[in-house]
Amino acid sequence: MPFWLDMLKKLSEEKQSVISINDQLFHCLKRSLNVFDEHSVIRQCFLDLGLFPEDQKIAATALMDMWVHLYKHDDEGLKTIKLLLELSYKNIVNMSPIRDDSLMVANWCEEKTVRQHDVMRQLAIHLSSQGPKEHRKRLVINVNGEDLPPLPDEINAQILSISTGERFSMNWNDMQASKVEVFVLNFMSEKYVLPRFMKYIEKLKVLIITNYGYFFSELQNFPPPQYLSSLTRIRLDHVSIFSISTQLLELVNMQKLSLIMCKIGNSFNEFTDGIPKKLPNLLELDIESCDDLVTFPKVLCTLVRLRKLSIINCHNLISLSEEFGGLINLEVLRLTSCSDLTTLPDSIVNLKKLIIIDISYCIQLSKLPKRMGELSFLKTIHMTACAWLDEISSTFDELCSLEVVCDDEISGLWNHHPNVSKQIIEKDTFVTFSKIVSN
C-alpha cells in the first residue's frame, strides 16, 4: 500500500505519466515491443497510435489515411487491417469485434475501430520523444489546461499531433512547421481557432481534425487554399463545415474528403457550377452520420473523377437527384443505413463503371430502377435488411456474373434470375435495430 500511495502522490504532484517516473515499468513495457524490429513499419504504426487522445476510439479509416501516405499502404485498407489485427493479437491494442455480416465494400477498414490502453499510449509518446529533437519523426503536444506549454520556434517532425481540452485558451504562436506532412488535431470546443502556423505547413499531405466535445464545432482561421495546396486527404469529425466549404472546394490536389458526424446544412448548395474545376482530383468522398443531410447536393454530382462514394448512417437522407448520374466514373457506391431513402434515381444507369453498390439497411427503399440491370460492370449488390423491396427488374438477367449479398427475406426476390449468384448471410435483429437508431 505505501508504494501505491507514494506513486499516486508523485503522479498528482509532478503531473507526469507513470512511464516517465518509473524506469522499471518503462523497460518492462518496452520489452513487449522487442518482437518488432526497431525500424519496422509495425513498430512505427504503434508509435502513431499515440497521436490520438487517451480513452477514445480510433477509426481504422483515419489510420489508413495516414498510413497510405507514410508507409505506402493500399487504399483498400488490406495492409492497415492486417497490421491492426497483428497488434491486437499481441494485446497491444484492443480492436472492435468484427461481426459475421461485416463485409468489405469500400475498404477493409470501414466501421472498425481500435482503442489503446492509456499506459501503452504513454509508452508510444515516450518512445517518440526520445533522441535529439531535430531528428524526431513525431511531435506530440498535449495541453490539459488553459495555456500552451513552451513550444519550439521550428518543428522538424514529419508528424504533428496536438490535443487540447475544454479550457484551452487558443493562443498560438507562429511556429515554423514546413516539414510536417501529417497533422492530427484533437480538441473539445464549440468554436476552435486553428493554429496560425498552418499557413506555413507547405508539405502537409494529411489533415485529421476531430472535435471530441458534445456540440458541433465551428472552425475559425482555416487557411486559404493556397497554403494547403499539397493536401491530398482531409478527415473532419464533428465540426460544422459551412464556414470552410469554399476553402475545401478549392483544394486542387485533394484526393479524399471524409466528413464524419459533421454539420453540412446548405454548405454546398450555394455553388451552382465549377465544382470539377475546384476539385479536379477528388477520387473518394465519405459522408458518415451527418444527420442534416437530406438530399445529396446537386453540385457534387459533377465530380466526374470520383470513384468511391460512401454515404453511411445518414438517416434523414431522402433522395438522390437525377443529376446523380453525372458521377460517370463511380465504381463503388455505398448507401448503408440511410433509413429514410425510398428510391434510387433512374439516372443511376449512367454509372457505367459501377462495380459495387451497397444499399444494406435502407429499410424504406421500395424499388430499384428498372434499367439498373444495364450496368454491365456491376459485380456485387449488398442488400441486407431491405424488407420493403418487392420486385427486381428483369434487366438483371443480362448480368452473368452478378453476386447478391442479402438475407433470407430478400433472397427469394432473386429466384427468377438464374444468372445471379446469392450469398446469404444471417440477419442479426439487434444489428439491424442498432443501425436504424444509431447517430
Image (cartoon, helix red, strand yellow):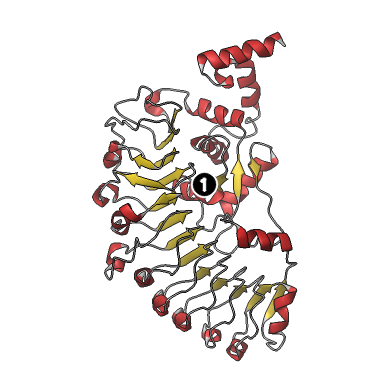
Element under label 1? helix
- Drawn side of residue 311 relative to residue 361, left or right: left
Q: Is residue 181 visible?
A: no
Query: Could you say where residue 182 lies in the image, as x and y percent from the top left?
Result: 40, 42
Q: Which residue of the protein is positioned furthest toward the bottom in this rendering?
A: 394
Quarter holding residue 253: bottom left
Residue position marked by numbered label 1 in the rendering? 63
**Residue at x 44% of width, y 55% of height:** 259
Vertical comparison of 246 with 26: above or below:
below
Vertical comparison of 411 with 36: above or below:
below
Query: Could you say where residue 395 lies in the image, as x and y percent from the top left?
Result: 58, 89
Query: Could you say where residue 239 lies in the image, as x and y percent from the top left?
Result: 42, 49
Q: Nearer the viewer, residue 186 or 270?
A: 270
Q: Is residue 349 visible?
A: yes
Quadrant holding the N terminus: top right
**Residue at x 62% of width, y 49% of height:** 82
